[in-house]
Amino acid sequence: MHSARPFRAAPGSRGVFPAAPAVLALALNAIALAAIPAAFAADAPADQKPLPVALVNALNTLAGGPHAGFRANHAKGILVTGTFTPAKTAPSFSSAPHFAKTVPVLVRFSDTTGVPNIPDASPDASPHGMAIRFKLPDGGSTDIVSISTNGFPVGTPQDFLALLTAISKSGPGVPKPTPVEQFLGTHPAALKFVSTPKPPPQSFGSLAFYGVNAFKFTNAKGVSHFARYQVLPVAGEHALAAAETTKADPNYLIDELPKRIAAGPVKFRLVAQVSKEGDVTNDATAVWPPDREIVELGVISLTATEKEQAKEQKALLYNPLSLTPGIEASADPILAARPPAYAVSFAQRAGQ
């Protein structure tokens, strides 16, 4: 059985949090709670909270929150700006407008957990997050939400809640096998997720990010493919050595990125990993083989750091289902669960 190390209590928390799930940190507003899908609300007995509320409550419990003004997950982050320039191959893959013309982007890098002061090198801070907003020519926007691990620990929001609940009941002194050990013993994808090494990166700019949910991309001729996003650092992937990790400043990632951007643009390749016939497109735990076709979509070039960090991050809404023509959601239940849970988290940090 996997050791309990990834489930240590994060600094400032009352509970334990895995070095694993990066999830549910976006939002609409309090009104959106009325639009919680009936399927999610129906999952809970009348005397229990709807699933999106229960998910956020579980995240808050693990982080010792809620922490006023912060997300229930990925609370600690930094906001930067730049541009996205599409590759020549992008328009033939999807008719999405940002695949045809250079557009501004607003990007937030973050640490996992709802602990606002978590040390950046902590195992509990990984997987890290990268959320990207493309500002479209018509004044609208479309978003990508990604994490620094390829794949997700569970395939349904119900199992994610079960995992969070098991972690919260597996503190020191709990008889073995603990609830989280029992969960991992019956969920091999979750066991693999938490067992996979996640060394702290040298920089947010030297870390790869992955969209764990599939989307359907359609070009102007009506040709469609299911694919997942990958966001790959042009500078290459570089992790801290073990000796560097123990000496790392608690805010080294947050402090380093503005300096790196000031020295020159920080660039990422946005690519799409295309599914083959038979590949599962509705399960975030089903990682596709690395030999699948990769389509170049373009380059993200980050050139400035937002000045009003706290204000802008608190008000910012990333939504992976804020889509544009040429891109459609898959039937992945984790993807469908994100906006309702993000609505709860947003209302919480907005004080509603």
Image: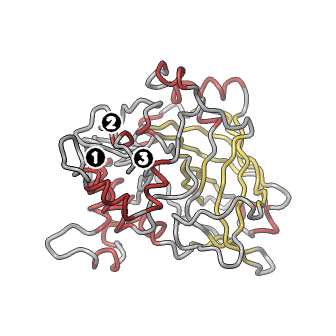
Alpha carbon of mark 2 to alpha carbon of mark 1: how far? 9 Å
Q: Could you tell me how many numbered marks the image carries?
A: 3
Give amino acid for label 1.
Answer: Leu
> Helix, strand or loop at disc 2?
loop
Horizontal and vertical percent position of residue 302: 67, 38
Q: Nearer the viewer, residue 13 or 165?
A: 165
Give amino acid for label 2.
Answer: Ala
Give the color scheme: rainbow, by chain, secondary structure or one colour.
Answer: secondary structure
Answer few, some or many: residues within 10 Å of disc 1's Cα (few below 14, many 20 plus, some between 14 and 19).
many
Alpha carbon of mark 3 to alpha carbon of mark 2: how far? 25 Å
Label 2 close to label 1 by CB (< 8 Å)? yes
Residue sitting at 54 percent across and 50 percent down?
Answer: 147
**Which residue is label 1 attached to?**
62
Identity of the residue furthest to the left in this view: 47
Label 1 close to label 3 by CB (< 8 Å)? no
Task: Classify residue 104 as left or right of residue 307.
Answer: right
**Residue 315 numbered tag:** 3
Horizontal and vertical percent position of residue 76: 42, 37
Residue sitting at 53 percent across and 33 percent down?
Answer: 200
Mark nearest the camera among 1 and 3 is: 1
> Helix, strand or loop at disc 1?
helix
Task: Classify residue 8 as left or right of residue 330.
Answer: left
Residue sitting at 37 percent across and 65 percent down?
Answer: 186
The earlier-in-sequence mark between 2 and 1 is 2
The earlier-in-sequence mark between 1 and 3 is 1
Alpha carbon of mark 1 to alpha carbon of mark 3: how far? 23 Å
**Residue 10 numbered tag:** 2
